[in-house]
Image: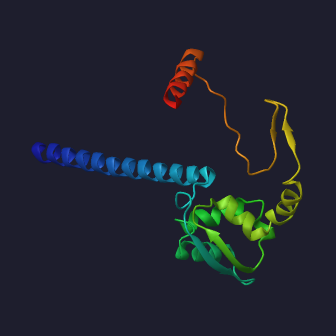
């Protein structure tokens, strides 16, 4: 009888350890999934790398956040509709989404997608076009930019000897 009790206690202990391992593994996987989901909510990563591709999508008045998120996943603008739904619910544009036909790019992050759906950039574009020809001065480096599309080229950061040698080489080649 004593051997049966020992074997029974050992088997019971092994079962408890196995159950504890499964519970801990489940909790670990759940915690990792929850962390990744929470990180992706605020990391706001786009679905594709720029330049991406343009996708036309229709948003109707009857669409709620869930239907909108599922539609965006279906056409390839977002990777996970559940994640995008939470981003919609947390967005400042939640109440401002307008129905219509939109051409969006899959390299846009969720904030840019929602801003486009809310029409947030419409007024800014008009202001930018009016000021595009105006000259602006950047007080930090006193560079004058003629247009918003101009590219500021940084100064040469090497030592002066390298620049002099390069200049001498070009003079010799021209002769």
Question: Who is closer to the viewer here, 135 or 17?
Answer: 135
Residue 51, percent across and down?
56, 60
The residue drawn where x is 23% and y is 46% is 14
Relative to 123, 80 lies left or right: left
Relative to 141, 48 lies left or right: left
Q: Which residue ends up furthest to the front in the rendered image?
A: 175
Q: Which residue ends up furthest to the top in the rendered image?
A: 161
The residue drawn where x is 74% and y is 81% is 100
Residue 39, percent across and down?
57, 49
Indicate whether 61 appears above or below 133: below
The residue drawn where x is 82% and y is 46% is 146
Question: Who is closer to the viewer here, 59 or 131?
Answer: 131
Residue 34, percent across and down?
52, 53
Indicate the quadrant where residue 88 lies. bottom right
Indicate the quadrant where residue 54 lies. bottom right
The total number of labels drawn is 0
Relative to 61, 163 lies left or right: left
The residue drawn where x is 78% and y is 50% is 148
Q: How is the image coloured?
A: rainbow
Residue 151, percent across and down?
70, 44
């Amino acid at each position: 009888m004593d051997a049966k009790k020992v074997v029974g206690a050992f088997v019971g202990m092994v079962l408890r350890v196995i159950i504890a391992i499964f519970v801990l593994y489940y909790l670990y996987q759940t915690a990792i999934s929850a962390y990744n989901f929470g990180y992706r909510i605020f990391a706001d990563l786009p679905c594709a790398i720029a330049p991406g591709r343009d996708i036309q999508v229709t948003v109707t008045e009857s669409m709620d956040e869930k239907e909108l998120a599922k539609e965006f996943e279906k056409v390839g603008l977002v990777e996970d509709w559940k994640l995008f739904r939470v981003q919609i619910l947390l967005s400042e544009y939640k109440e401002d989404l307008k129905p219509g036909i939109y051409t969006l790019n899959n390299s846009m992050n969720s904030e840019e997608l929602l801003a486009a759906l809310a029409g947030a950039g419409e007024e800014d574009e008009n202001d930018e076009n009016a000021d595009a020809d105006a000259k602006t001065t950047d007080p930090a480096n006193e560079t004058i930019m003629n247009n918003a599309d101009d590219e500021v080229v940084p100064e040469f950061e090497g030592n002066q000897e390298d620049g002099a040698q390069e200049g001498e080489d070009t003079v010799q080649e021209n002769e």
